[in-house]
Image (cartoon, rainbow, N blue to C red):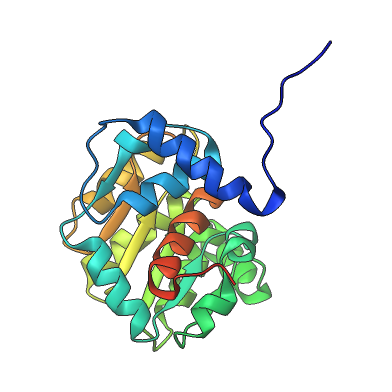
Amino acid sequence: MKVNLEKVLPRDIENRSFEIITQELGDTPLIPGTELIVKRCIHTSADFDYAKNLRFSEGAVEKALNALKNGACIVTDTQMAKAGINKKALARLGGEVFCFMSDEDVAATAREHGTTRATASMDKAAALKKPLIFAIGNAPTALVRLYELMEEGSLRPELIIGAPVGFVNVVQSKELIMETDVPYIVAAGRKGGSNIAACICNALLYMLNNDRN
C-alpha cells in the first residue's frame, strides 16, 4: 500500500505541527496570553480538548512568569514530570526542579501517618524556603494536601499547575484548587498527566527564554 507522507525536514517537524494546530483551532477563542500554553498541551497530547478544559486564574500566566524570573523553583509529584521539564532553561532563571516522591524520609512519613507519598512529599516541599511552583500531573492527594496547607496558612505557592489524570478524586481535587485565591492553571475534568504538567512548565519557560535549549 502506498502512503502519501508530507515531506518535512526533521528540524521543521515541530514548527509544522504548530502550524497544523493553529489551523485546526481556527477561530476557537483562547484567553490572550495563554495561547502558547494551550497549543503546547495540544502538541504534547494531540488532544484539542485542552483548548476548552484549561482553566487559568486571573493573571496566572503573568504572575508565573514574574515568579520564574525571580528564581522560583518547581516541585513535581512524579519523576516523569521532573524529567520532562527543561532544567537548563529553568537554571538560567535561577530555579531548579524538585521531586521528593522517591525519598526515603517521604516513604517513612507516609507509612507512619497512613497517607500517600504524594501527600508526604507536599509536606516536605512546604518546608523549602523558596518561591515555589507546584506542577501536579498524577496525584489528586497532592492537590488536596496543597489545599490543606494553604488553608492552614503554612504555604503560599506562586502557582499551582493542577493536571492529575484519572477517575478517583481527580475532578474534586482540581475544583478545590480553583476555589483558592492562589494563581493556578488547571486541566479541568479527568484529563491531564505528568506530560501535561511538564508541558505547561516548559511553555512558561519558553515564553521567557525564547528557545528550547
Q: Nearer the viewer, residue 170 or 189?
A: 189
144 lies above or below 97:
above
Residue at the (52%, 76%) spot, across then down: 89
Q: Nearer the viewer, residue 205 or 102?
A: 205
210 lies above or below 144:
below
Q: In the image, is 107 to the left or to the right of 97? A: right
In the rendered view of the protein, which quadrant contains the N terminus? Answer: top right
How far across and how far down the image is residue 26, in percent?
A: 31, 30
Quarter holding residue 5: top right
How far across and how far down the image is residue 204, in percent?
A: 39, 65
How far across and how far down the image is residue 81, in percent?
A: 58, 59
Q: Nearer the viewer, residue 4 or 99?
A: 4
Residue at the (40%, 86%) spot, across then down: 71
Residue at the (34%, 37%) spot, across then down: 51
Q: Residue furthest right?
A: 1
Inspect this view and state whether residue 108 appears.
yes
Q: Nearer the viewer, residue 48 or 149?
A: 48
Residue at the (44%, 52%) spot, across then down: 141
Q: Residue furthest top?
A: 1
Number of callouts in the render?
Answer: 0
Inspect this view and state whether residue 155 appears.
no
How far across and how far down the image is residue 62, in percent?
A: 23, 68
Q: In the image, is 50 to the left or to the right of 183? A: right
In the rendered view of the protein, which quadrant contains the C terminus? Answer: bottom right
